Amino acid sequence: MVIRTDAGLYVPEADLYIDPLRPVHRAVVTHGHADHARRGSEHYLAAASGVGILRKRLGDEARIEAIAFGERRRLGGATLSLHPAGHILGSAQVRIEVGGEVWLVTGDYKRTPDASAEPFESLRCHTLISECTFGLPVYRWPEPDGVFREIERWWVENAAEGRTTLLCGYSLGKAQRLLAGLLPFMEGGGAPGTILVHGAVDELLPAYRAEGIAFPPTERVSVETAREHRGAALVVAPPSAAGTAWVRKLGPVSVGFASGWMRIRGRRRRRSGDRGFVLSDHVDWDGLMATIDESGAERVGLTHGQTGTAMRYLTEERGLDTFAIATREGDA
Amino acid sequence: MRRFTRLFMELDRTTRTNEKLAALRRYFAEAPAADAAWALAVLTGRRIRRAVPGARLREWVADRSGYPLWLVEECYDTVGDLAETLALLLPDPETDAEPPALHTIMDEWLAPLPGADDSGKRRVVERAWGCMDESERLVFHKLLTGGFRVGVGRKLVTRALAQEVGMEPAILAHRLTGRWAPTPETYRRLISPDAELRDAGRPYPFFLAHPLSEGPEALDGGPKAWMVEWKWDGIRAQLIHRDGERLLWSRGEEVITPAFPEIGEAAGALPSGTVLDGELLAWESTAPLRFAELQRRLGRKRPSPKIRREVPARFLAYDLLEAEGEDLRGLPQEARRRRLEALFEDLEVRPPDDGPIPVTWAVGLPLGLSPLVEAARWDALAELRTSARELGVEGFMLKHREAEYGVGRPRGAWWKWKVEPLTLDVVLLYAQKGHGRRASLYTDYTFGVWDGEELVPIGKAYSGLTDREIRRVDKWIRRNITERFGPVRAVEPELVFELAFDQIRPSSRHKSGLALRFPRMVRQRTDKPVDEADTLESARRLLAERP
Ligand SMILES: [Zn+2]
Ligand SMILES: [Zn+2]
């Protein structure tokens, strides 16, 4: 079974924590974002394709045991398996089975296509613990293909006006999704310039390439490359870079943000950028409902975001048993 | 509708003036006149009557989407914009039918709506949902709920259209003054290079005064060269009687005749072809009532006999802009005043009343002649100014005897010398709850002024409003929150307040570069559209406002 403790979700039969909040003996880590992968535990279990990324976060000395997706592991009285969550490369859902009773912890996940991550797998369980970062029905994601066409058009327009295109997204996950998603455009020959990447993004590319993820050719942003490609390049950088002096070396820029929050016009307008693209690595409302339906779960735990609203909806409208799992700030 | 929606999205997503200008020009270049007429009306701030209450729309959306009403409400809380919330919640349309043109929506769908019954209204709304995508629904909801705002000012729209059709922005701006019907014919006339536009209801652009912060001693020509009037604490307005039209226009270029029908009727007593410039006031026996009282009547379509009794309206004329159909604005101030006094004599007047400021009233009409202030010396005027408060006025207007009735706000011809010399019309940007007795209400406000297309904070204030006003503003704030930062709420930039302060100084600590000393609210300016709030530039001018 899966219980809530101060250190996070815990499976007593296997003496195993899921994404523990502090160092423990044995941890299974769903993915490399800072609110899920924390340093200091003795043993880590993780999906094989995400280990390269995790090493970047947990350090070279961390003892990480890789498990292939779908592979069943017997740990004490529990059976554990990991399944693709579609959030970022190697992100996993954790399935725990104890005596015929199944718990599923989704970790962060999404159901929309992403060329840089394994597609989400829908599973059945008795108790589902799902993220709910975007737990309101106003959050419904458009088709990513359409969003990429918008990004490409915006780049072409910027280049026509001699502006460098600065596209911001989380350095782990979103940035790689953007790059992989731009590959067809780059190969099709329609791109007005080169893609430059911020150092924080660049550092993670080898871990992806090692897993066979294909990216278009990129160059790292430097004073020289920025000067050379000024006005024509598309620069992929973390959002934190957007407000800093770093941007100045790019010359005149048009700034875009790729995030689920961009679904709301007020957020879009007040983010001091020029464009907002609705591209999220989390599940939207409809996706959350689909996951719950497909799981057949009777008990649903929610974590991240406005859990209270979704819980009330699931209780009142769907007759489900619900509970909340507290998380910390800064979820990604 | 599709084209207009694209324009809306383009305007909405950029903060760059050039891009907005380009998007507007593109729209006006491509749109047929029937659509462009409506787009121009809506973008220059034409208010559309709200035909469906927001609460009703939320119910329909709950119905259509299958979400419980409380969930729709929670979404609204998060999104902060009703039109948008509803657009985001509705399921995708089942067909890929195209919505009709903007003018069809406005003329055929929305115009008859106020007269329809509930199910008739719902049919129109459902029909719209059936053929519109998400962003089109957003725009449709905005038109439907009468809350159309997008980040462009009237000036920018005027500039874009003027550039696109190759005419002087000033000429177009003048033509856009006042009421015009959003029809293709009118639109073509508005943009035609030579058409002399005749419209019986049109007011003249209001001539504006500069504030005088020091005394008038430095004014050219001494007291003899100046005509002094009381500066009333009401609403500046033009009263027009022309070709059967009787209209009262506020300085915000809105027709306010329906709210003040007695003034509209009285205009009929003026000879046809008369335009008066003056002050609209709430008046009781021989003295004006507080401005807040007057505001209670503003915005009402049909004031009840009760409120008309409680807040009787008067119009005090101080300038004559047109007589017998002739434009008098080129005459000197003094000559216009003589014509104005002659006009009142023709109307038959009572001897001045015995109020604190004696006013000459036309017999049986709520029309009066705003008296001149006789002061042979400036120090006598300064003395009189100290009692302005008790007299219920804001100070004096100093008008040069030779002054034409100009356009805009050139320096030198008209000055306002107020008891509160330093004021700015500012836009409410943020609100925070008060303390103690007012802890449950939003009472602490941050205000901004225009810097180009952007509003920059200029000062905070929490005093000056009556309890009744505070409650009203608090209620409005709750419905118009756009973002939360801790205890601070950002609101839709829509309300204009007059802010008075003792001093204005340069400051490197504020984004505006200016700091106000002891700012307080004088009043809410419900008569002023947000576009006409003050600018950073006009605030800077106050730094050294001397004749
Ligand atoms: Zn994550
Ligand atoms: Zn997370």
Image (cartoon, rainbow, N blue to C red):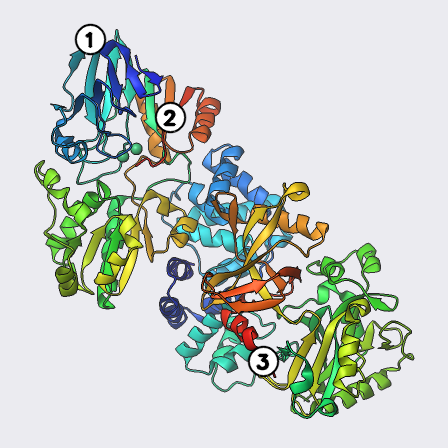
Identity, as a three-letter code, of the amino acid under mark 1: Gly
The C terminus of chain B, quarter of image: bottom right
Q: Label 3 belongs to which residue?
A: B409
The secondary structure type at the circle numbered 2 is strand
Q: Label 2 belongs to which residue?
A: A302
Residue at 43% in and 59% down:
B1
Identity, as a three-letter code, of the amino acid under mark 2: Leu
- The residues bearing labels 2 and 1 have C-alpha atoms spaced at a distance of 27 Å
Picture coordinates of residue A130, whole percent (x, y): 33, 26
Residue at 31% in and 45% down:
A259
The secondary structure type at the circle numbered 1 is loop
Picture coordinates of residue B372, whole percent (x, y): 79, 82
Q: Which of A140 and A44 is in front in this view?
A: A44
- Label 2: chain letter: A
Ligand 2 near label 2 (Cβ, under 8 Å)? no
Whether residue B242 is visible: no
The quarter of the picture where residue A89 lies is: top left
The secondary structure type at the circle numbered 3 is loop
